[in-house]
Amino acid sequence: SILFSALYGSKFDSNPKMWRMFAALSLDLSTILEMVSIFFPSNFLLVASLANAGKNISWIAASASRAAIHNSFSNGQNLADITAKSG
């Protein structure tokens, strides 16, 4: 996840909707991978680790894009208010 942040961290502001969609899809795929990891007992640790890494990448992309989306809604004075009300 640190490598993902280093490579793509500067791109979250340019297209936050795309990165939010990426985060949602990667979380779904990682969750599916986590659920099917039980069917690979010889490679369970590898599959579960990949699923966990995918979830970490998803949370990084979601939180970074959420900040950019909140910033686009603010008028420069109310960013904390928008962030607090978003849940």
Image (cartoon, rainbow, N blue to C red):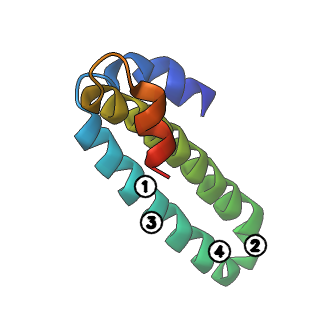
Viewer-proximal residue among 75 and 18: 75
Mark 2 and mark 1 lie on one chain; the one further toward the N terminus is: 1
Q: What residue type is labelled 2?
A: Ser
Where is mark 2, residue-wise? 42
Label 2 residue SS: helix
Where is mark 1, residue-wise? 26
Residue at 44% x, 66% y is 28
Residue at 45% x, 46% y is 85
Q: Which mark is residue 28?
A: 3
Q: Where is residue 57 in the image (x, y as percent from the top left)?
A: 53, 42
Viewer-proximal residue among 41 and 62: 62
Residues tagged 1 and 3 counted as in contact (Cβ below 8 A): yes
Q: Which amino acid does label 1 sit on?
A: Ser
Residue depth check, mark 3 versus mark 4: number of the one nearer the observer: 3
Residue at 32% x, 21% y is 11
Distance of label 3 from label 2 (alpha carbons): 24 Å
Q: Residue 66 carries which label?
A: none
Q: Residues within 10 Å of mark 3 (few under 14, many from 20)?
A: some
Mark 3 and mark 4 lie on one chain; the one further toward the N terminus is: 3
Viewer-proximal residue among 73 and 12: 73
Residue at 52% x, 62% y is 30
Label 4 residue SS: helix
Q: What residue type is labelled 4?
A: Ser
Where is mark 4, residue-wise? 37
Viewer-proximal residue among 23 and 73: 73
Distance of label 4 from label 1 (alpha carbons): 16 Å
